[in-house]
Image: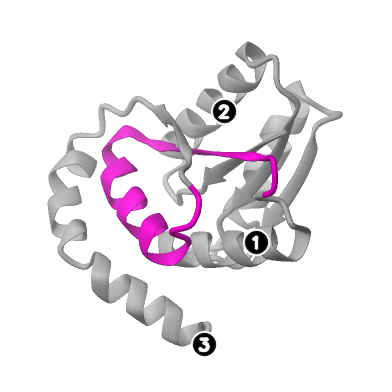
């Protein structure tokens, strides 16, 4: 079984790109998959990013097994909660983890994943983004990765 993690985003266009990327991945994979959708509510939204993605994915794949993390507020928390879920469900044994995110976000997400999880080598499924601002902002976000990891680990007392 492949555990496919989809990282949420409060930008609906970027989130839709990730959802389309995971749907394409599922449709082209012969493997059995389980989805882990991660992302809480931001900017006053009543629905979490994970629940919005779930609704979109269930339209095309109503029978797929989906777990949602509706509380994570950033990438470090996405992976902290994923790691807890994997440990609680023994889901890393004989399972492959695939992370779906945007192409501009991959380097930062990988660094955070390795800092939080570290014992799993994931496969990456990347959506393509033409968001100019996203690409320009990413080097700034990269400078904060270590602090983001430390803050999230302290917050979750890990």
C-alpha span from label 3 to label 1: 19 Å
Which element carries disc 1, helix, strand or loop?
loop
Residue appearing at x 54%, y 65% in the figure: 72
Residue neighbourhood size for the residue with mark 1, other residues' Cα within 10 Å, grouped as few (<14), some (14–19), many (≥20): many
- 142 vs 98, left or right, is left
Residue appearing at x 59%, y 59% in the figure: 82
Which circle marks residue 70 in the picture?
1
Q: Which quarter of the picture shows residue 30?
A: top right
- 34 vs 103, left or right, is right
Q: Which residue is mark 2?
A: 22
C-alpha span from label 1 to label 2: 18 Å
Q: Which quarter of the picture shows residue 149?
A: bottom left
Which element carries disc 3, helix, strand or loop?
loop
Q: Which of marks 2 and 1 precedes in the sequence?
A: 2
- Whether residue 130 is in magenta: the answer is no
Q: Which residue is mark 3?
A: 157
Q: Which quarter of the picture shows residue 113?
A: bottom left
Residue appearing at x 69%, y 48% in the figure: 93
Q: Which residues are magenta?
A: 93-120
In this rendering, the label closer to the viewer, 2 or 3? 3
Total marks in image:
3
Residue most extreme to the right:
63
């Amino acid at each position: 079984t492949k555990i496919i993690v989809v990282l949420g985003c409060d930008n609906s266009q970027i989130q839709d790109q990730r959802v389309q990327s995971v749907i394409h991945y599922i449709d082209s994979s012969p493997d059995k998959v389980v989805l882990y959708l991660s992302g809480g509510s931001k900017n006053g939204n009543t629905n979490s990013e994970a629940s919005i993605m779930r609704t979109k994915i269930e339209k095309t794949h109503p029978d797929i097994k989906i777990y949602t993390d509706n509380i994570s507020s950033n990438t470090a928390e996405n992976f902290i909660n994923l790691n807890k879920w994997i440990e609680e469900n023994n889901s890393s044994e004989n399972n492959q983890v695939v992370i779906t995110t945007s192409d501009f976000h991959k380097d930062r997400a990988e660094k955070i994943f390795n800092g939080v999880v570290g014992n799993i080598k994931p496969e990456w499924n990347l959506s393509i983004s033409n968001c100019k601002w996203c690409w320009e902002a990413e080097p700034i976000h990269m400078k904060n990765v270590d602090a983001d990891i430390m803050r999230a680990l302290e917050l979750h007392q890990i």
